[in-house]
Image (cartoon, helix red, strand yellow):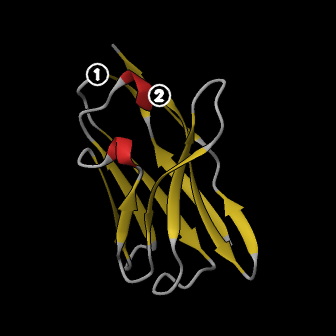
Amino acid sequence: VQLQASGGGSVQAGGSLSLSCRTSGVNSRITPVSWHRQAPGKERELVAQITGDGMASYQDSVMGRFSISRDYARNTVRLQMSSLKPEDTGVYYCHTTGAGTEFWGRGTLVTVSS
């Protein structure tokens, strides 16, 4: 299993960014994928998750601002982030599980300036 994350960058508050996580070695139709983030000095936290059949769930703080989706043809999970706030700053990681093992993509930095 491999997770290849891309996207991120720097943006001013109120702006938008999109992250992508390309998966390989997983059955996209049955495997949930999630995005987590870790802000400086804080623990990693779950931001959004999408099931194999496309059901999405979100952390309360990003509800209505972030949208997670799957592109089955490209084995990609996207996280569209809008109305970004400085507190959204952090390293974002995509995550999945398989055969009882957790897999993490390389983190991608999102910086939101006020």
**Residue 105's x, y, as percent?**
63, 55
- Tell me the number on the disc at residue 64: none
Residue found at the far top of this picture:
114
Q: Report if residue 18 is visible in the image.
A: no
Left or right: residue 14 compared with residue 89: left
Kindly identify which residue carries mark 2.
89
Residue at point 63% right, 79% down? 25
Numbered disc 2: secondary structure: loop
Residue 95 found in image quarter: bottom right
Above-or-below relation of 25 to 106: below
Which quarter of the rendering shows the N terminus? bottom right
Residue found at the far front of this picture:
60
Above-or-below relation of 55 to 69: below
Kindly identify which residue carries mark 1.
13
Q: Earlier in the sequence, mark 1 or mark 2?
A: 1
Relative depth, front residue between 107 and 44: 44
